[in-house]
Image (spheres, rainbow, N blue to C red):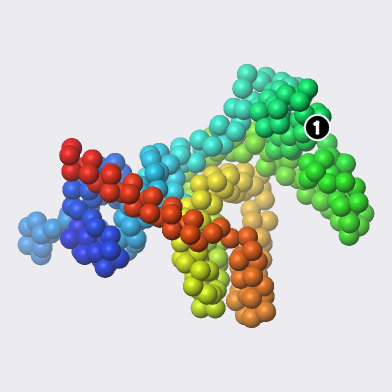
Amino acid sequence: MERTKSDVIAALATQEITMTKRRLTDWIQKRWLPPLTEQRDGHGRFARYVWTQPRIAEQVATLEELLGLGCRAPAIYGFLWLLGHDVPTPAAINALRTPIAQAWSLWGRGATSLEDVEDNISRYAVRLSRRRRGRPARYPGFAEAAARYEAVFNLLANPRFDATIAVLEQVLDMGPSRCNAGMTDESARAMRQWIQFAQRVLVVPRLYQAMETAPEHDFEQARADLLHIGQAVGYLRNVLLSAADDDMRRLLESRLILFGFLGAYGPWLIAADVALRRAGHGRVIERSLRWFSRKMWQLTQDPEAREQLISAMHQHAPDVSALDAFGNKSSHSVDRRRKRERRS
């Protein structure tokens, strides 16, 4: 479907979003929106400039919302790309690499061997414990907290770390009775095998290496996998909307949770997908996607399961009034940004 700037502005007006041609032009120049295509009439004469992307109005609305929430470039490229919109893939990849590189810099800075990484992890765990718990003399559990942080960071960044059940108890801050409750030897062995597999492929240095060396088409495949998950979740969300009360409906319709999830986990999910496929585990991803889609569909067909899910969401969901307050804050941010644009 072809749309001019005027068409997009009119479509957004039905959603109570005020837009101007000047702002659209600015966003095209920043490459947050795809370029317009020149159309000519049958005689080869100029007719008009249009967008041919079917979701262009949705992309503009999403961009307006992201800017209202305080999002800035280059993160905007990452958000729009993860949502399936048309932005330059290299710019989006650079945005997604940033949190992985920052995580690795915490533990890999100046490291030439795994011993150096382990030393960095130990120092960082002590520093984090001091910041969160107070100095050792004032906090009797300081050593335990530092050891727990060190175990967590080693699981994330050290491929040769020995993840025994005792270490898992320490990471989870559980005693043996809680950690082993209902866990058979077989399930404990399966958990350790899964962690050992993750340490070979999904530790931070492996993710960092995959993000730095993977070609562009690997990232496109990872985005397709993430969008597949999003479609399954979206279908379940639409079913839940029909059975939800007013507060839950407002929560499900809010995009703040979606943006928060993509900001926190989107880069890591893309990195994990890229790393797994480059390690030859593409079939594992395909089976997992089919399993996830099947589970989402089963939830939509089971009224009791839907009620349980809605009940759980009521217990753990953020206060809807907090979403309203954040939305009001975002509206004020949009108003201030528009005033600055008019002055300039």
Residue 246 appears anywhere in the view: yes
Q: Is residue 323 left or right of residue 210?
A: left
Q: Which residue is located at x 17 percent, y 60 percent? A: 6
Quarter containing the N terminus: bottom left
Disc 1: which residue: 141
Q: Which residue is located at x 18 percent, y 52 percent? A: 21
Say which element carries label 1: loop
Percent x, y of residue 322: 49, 55
From the viewer's side, name the closer residue of 271 and 9.
9
335 relative to 137, above or below = below
Q: Is residue 225 left or right of residue 9?
A: right
State how many labels appear: 1
* Label 1 crowd (10 A; few <14 / some 14-19 / many >=20): few
Instruction: Report the amino acid beneath label 1.
Output: Gly
Q: Which residue is located at x 63 percent, y 53 percent? A: 282
Quarter containing the C terminus: top left
From the viewer's side, name the closer residue of 235 and 227.
235
Percent x, y of residue 327: 40, 55
239 relative to 94, above or below = below
Q: Which residue is located at x 66 percent, y 20 percent? A: 111
